Image (cartoon, helix red, strand yellow):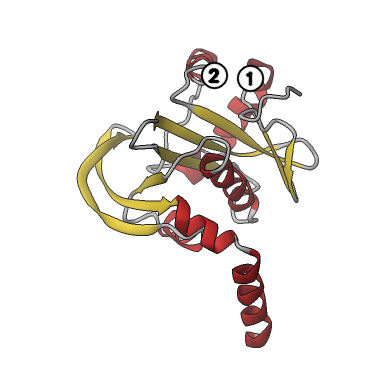
Amino acid sequence: MGNDSSYLGDFVVEPVRLERPTMQRADEFLQAVRNSRGLHRRWVSPPNDRRKFAQYVSGLRKDSRKGFFVVTDSGDIAGVINVSEIVRGSFRSAYLGYYAFRPFAGQGLLRQGLRAVISHCFGELGLHRLEANIQPENARSIALVATLGFRLEGLSPRYLKVCGRWRDHERWALLSENWRHRKSPDNGLRRTAARRNES
């Protein structure tokens, strides 16, 4: 593991850790993609052969892109998180993308990985805004970002071409100051106490 703060290769958020994608994981990644075709369907088109995966890994060398595998404590790839189109200067914004793999979808692993990546973006990377573009019919993905504090900003018709079709996307965004508020110790204690009172 390196000492580069942007690496996060040994960054552990129980029960997952984050790793930088490399070609050493190509076979495992591609098998996970094949196993998850039904899960991804119309929502996302991950690299599905070695050439495309190599292009993906190579693209992560750019300063404007970051990618992470969400890895279980047993070493399996549970999902992928991408931070793309990173813009510095007065904008300090980026796009956030993610997807889970079977059989790990719905277990909260991707959410834990997203929490770590978001903290990294607003901390070490110094970003101010993250935007996730989600198809309106993707209720699970919308629920996921909503629990992380993202807010709906609007609808972009025929925004992205996914699986061969131009599809509408909702724009969900999160600002660094809102994330810091959610992450503050007092606020976290209030949320924990509220959950206990409800139970």
* CB contact under 8 Å: marks 2 and 1: yes
**Label 1 packing within 10 angstroms: few (<14), some (14-19), many (20+):** some
Determine the residue positioned at 47% across, 21% down.
63
The image quarter containing residue 137 is: bottom left
Return the residue found at the far right.
Answer: 74
Q: Residue at x 67, y 80 (%)?
A: 193
Q: Quadrant of the N terminus?
A: top right
Q: Is residue 164 left or right of residue 51?
A: left
User: In the image, 31: left or right of 149?
Assistant: right
Q: Which mark is residue 22?
A: 1
| Position above or below: 98 against 180 | above
Residue 38 visible? The answer is no
Residue 103: percent from left, percent from top: 65, 47
In the rendered view, tell whether residue 73 sits above or below residue 65: below
Disc number at residue 57? 2
14 over 198 or under it: above or below = above
On-image quarter of the C terminus: bottom right
* Residue at x 50%, y 24% (from the top left corner): 48
> Could you give the CA–CA distance between mark 2 and mark 1, rounded to whole angstroms?
6 Å
Which mark is first along the chain, 1 or 2?
1
